[in-house]
Amino acid sequence: MNVCEAGYRVKFYTAVNLAAELAEAVQMNRLSKLEKSLSKIDLLIIDELSYLTFNRYQSEMLFQIISERSERASVIISTNLEFSQWTQLFENEMLLAALIDRVTFRSFVLNMNCSSSYRIDSTLNHD
């Protein structure tokens, strides 16, 4: 966990790493401890949501974490997919609808998708 200068507690995960850590916590019988730890975080950042699919169990665990934070603490989720394409990641459509509902309630959605890659543009325009 990082603590920024303002004293906020921030935790960064890739979506896959968070799902794996949750699954491991279940196997090690320490899920409630991990959930308690995550509940103390002021800002949870979940990166790369669009690269791998999640099975039903992983989806349910991710939903639980995001749902618990809903209206209590901040979450940033980065993905290359529009919400309508999240069905490619999560197999349970009802859970997905509830997840999107919680993610978008009182939120800011920044669409930063563009036709070109920032990394490629930066490399090509490097002097």
Image (cartoon, rainbow, N blue to C red):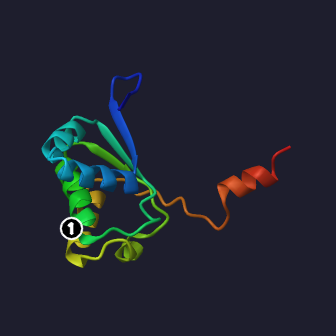
Left or right of residue 57, residue 78 in this image: right
| Front residue of 58 and 122 | 58
SS at badge 1: helix
Measured along the vertical axis of the image, is residue 61 above or below residue 35? below
* Residue found at x 21% / y 37%: 37
Q: Quadrant of the C terminus?
A: top right
- Find disc 1 in the rendering and name its residue: 98
Residue closest to the far right: 127
Q: Which residue: 28% across, 65% down?
A: 100
Residue 49 at what x, y percent from top left?
41, 60
Residue for point 35% across, 35% down: 10
Above or below, comparing residue 81 to residue 41 in the picture: below
Graded by Cα atoms within 10 Å as few (under 14), some (14 to 19) or many (20 or more), the crowding at tag 1 reads: few
The x, y position of residue 120, in whole percent, is: 72, 57
Q: Is residue 8 left or right of residue 31?
A: right
Q: Is residue 104 left or right of residue 79?
A: left
Q: Position of residue 65 (x, y in %)?
A: 22, 52
- What's the amino acid at mark 1? Ala
Q: Find residue 84 and report its horizontal and vertical position in percent.
A: 38, 76
- Seen in the picture, residue 33 relative to 110 is either above or below; the reply is above
